[in-house]
Image (cartoon, rainbow, N blue to C red):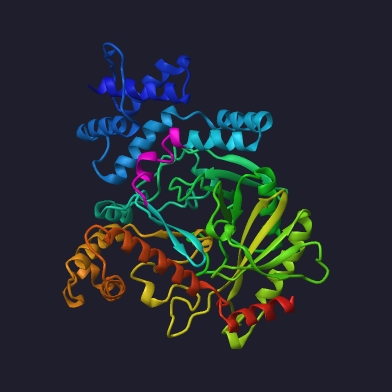
Amino acid sequence: MISTAIQQLVNYGLDTGLILPDDEIYIRNQLLMTMQLDSFTEPEGDVCYADLESILKTLVDDAAARGVCDDSPTARDLFDTRLMGVLTPRPSIVRANFEERYETDGPQAATDWFYKFSQDTDYIRRYRIKRDVKWVTKTPYGDLDITINLSKPEKDPKAIAAAKLAPQSAYPKCQLCVENEGYAGRLNHPARENHRIIPLTINDSAWNFQYSPYVYYNEHCIVFNNQHTPMKIERATFRKLLDFVSLFPHYFVGSNADLPIVGGSILSHDHFQGGHYEFAMAKAPIEKKWVFPGFEDVDAGIVHWPMSCIRLTCADDERLVELADQILTAWRGYTDESCFIYAETDGEPHNTITPIARMRDGKFQLDLVLRNNITTPEHPLGVYHPHAKLHHIKKENIGLIEVMGLAVLPSRLKAEMADVEAALVARTPAAEYGENIQKHAEWAMDILARHPELNAENVHTIVQDEIGHVFAEVLVDAGVYKMDTAGRAGFERFLANI
């Protein structure tokens, strides 16, 4: 039985091209060593397999039964990654493959190969990504992408307790550091034996390219500094983003902001996110054209989008860097009390930018989204952050991906929404909502009032649509200039100030 599973994994490696026929006996022996087995019985006949997930489950079940690894979700993830690490070629081979494809067939062929490779090695777990719930909601701002993320493993209580007791290590410094490549992991740090990265040079500095293991959209990649250095939005950021889209013109790339609340989840390591996907914001039209004095060659304007976005387009990327730097500098120091925008309070800076770069019709394009992280007693998590009445759906920071129109919602929502749907169909009074969905009760009553036609057949579609509209409100809350007369007048005052 276990010999069959080992041969199935070897055959999977051969079928995906991760290993070559000359490697077969060597890889089998490496797998035996990892499984702490010292013999192998050749299976009879053809060895077929259904999918990678079932092969790994069989092997990990056996290892756990024999005490080779603990039988907890975290320990099992560490162990099956070690097995996949045996099949994963060394970094030098992967990089040579990527570079050869880039030079011979072009950047898209190279990324197509690397994306498939990152899935074949199980670094991106296809079978987990499939579990994510995804839909599209039509809004006045375009079609918003909504996802409930179920692929990111949730820590079980035993693993959380064990991680607290585990010795603390500063290696790798964070999950984005180059030292993760091939790292075995530990209870409080994921295994990365099957992880490979591609070195890049952008703005004459050493960076790297990899995919996100939890791909939120097609070819969701991460571009990260070779050095463990904090996030910073500056002139050089625009240069790096435009250098990246020069190398990979079929990809967009953007950066989270560099301040808490409006920044992403990792501010300690300078990085960008990109991929082969067009978000609602990229499709949004220019609402009002604008000419910046001295930059008449740059097409510019305010984007019709709830987040306050300036779009710049020009064939000359240096001109974009120059103008974007002027806009950033102006915004950093800009205060407009009538729009409740303060550059700083008590010496704490509030203004920054979320920038996104892409190629559009052979020209370079930058979207600059204005951000401000001021808090008040009424909005302690941020004035330009989802307001409290929306926290039952989305409370987390609005980072780069959400800014562009894709909601990444917490996994808790899947079960909660099923319960809300049942309560809606049953016309359950708000006071009788269960403890886990009480926070949704007021919202649910509002849905019912607006949808008297709601029944068991259409409730799921209605609830999904309503979640999408909550996300649209989230974007409105996070926009520094609102899409009303006063907001647009304030936006134009800022642009005139540059």
User: Along the horizontal axis of the image, is 63 left or right of 309?
Assistant: left
Identify whether 104 is placed above or below 175: above
Q: Could you say which quadrant of the image residue 447 lies in?
A: bottom left
Q: Quadrant of the N terminus?
A: top left
Point 53% across, 79% down: residue: 374
Q: Is residue 389 above or below residue 280?
A: below
Q: Quadrant of the C terminus?
A: bottom right
The structure residue drawn at horizontal position 59% and vertical position 82%, both measured from the top left corner, is 485
Range of magenta residues: 119-133
Residue 174 position in % (x across, y down): 49, 52
The picture places residue 145, in percent across and down from the top left corner, at 45, 57
The quarter of the picture where residue 465 lies is bottom left
Towards the viewer: 124 or 464:
464
Which residue is most to the right?
294
- Decide: is 350 above or below 150: below
As drawn, the residue found furthest toward the bottom would be: 338
Magenta stretch: residue 155 in it? no
Is residue 124 visible to the viewer in this orientation of the structure? Answer: yes
Question: Between residues 399 and 466, which one lies in front from this camera angle?
Answer: 466
Q: Nearer the viewer, residue 319 or 161?
A: 319
Q: Is residue 150 left or right of residue 340?
A: left
Nearer-the-camera pick, 417 or 175: 417
- Measured as percent of width and height from the top left, residue 222 is found at 54, 49
Figure label count: 0
Q: Is residue 346 visible?
A: no
Instruction: List x then y, in percent, for residue 445.
Output: 26, 75
Is residue 129 on the magenta stretch? yes
Q: Is residue 452 above or below residue 243?
A: below
Name which residue lies at 60% across and 87% down: 337
